[in-house]
Amino acid sequence: MRHMLFLMLLIFSGQPLAIESAVGVVQKVKVFSLLPDRYNPSDQAMLAIYINELPGACGSGQKRIAIGSAHPLFDAVTSIAMVSKTTKTKVEVGYLGSCSIRSNAWDFSVIELLED
């Protein structure tokens, strides 16, 4: 069923079939400004989700995905990541094979909270 969900998301999202996935427990959640060296209340937030089972993003040692606050799923992704972190429940995360949002974080595609 889980793989069917990923396939349906691929078909309807128009994304190329370059989505990778990993299953694990969220180890760390980091939220920061897109421009962290200055204060701007209109700035976009970034969410980084660290999962040990991810490969290092784009050749870095950072095992994380990133999503920006302008993404329509930002709040839902934040909630799922926090549930995984606090309850130690596994998630399956899909990510694109690119690091365009952050040079050392995979670009977010999909996340699913798994049942124990």
Image (spheres, grey):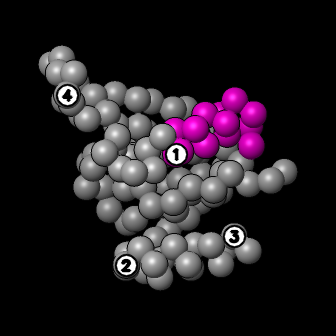
| Marked residue nearer the N-terminal end (2 or 3) | 3
Residue 77 lies within the magenta run: yes
Q: Which residue is mark 3?
A: 2
Which residue is depicted at the point 80% across and 53% down? 115
Quadrant of residue 39 in the image? Answer: top left
Query: Which comes before the other along the chain, label 1 or label 3?
Result: 3
Please, is residue 3 above or below residue 69 in the view?
A: below
Which residue lies most toward the right here? Answer: 116
Distance of label 4 from label 1 (alpha carbons): 21 Å
Q: Which mark is residue 47?
A: none
Instruction: Give the magenta-colored segment's residue range.
Output: 76-89
Q: Name the side, left or right, on which 81 lies relative to 17.
A: right
Amino acid, disc 3:
Arg
Q: Which mark is residue 42?
A: 4
Q: Earlier in the sequence, mark 4 or mark 1?
A: 4
- Mark 4 or 3 closer to N-term? 3
Q: SS class of the residue under badge 4? A: loop
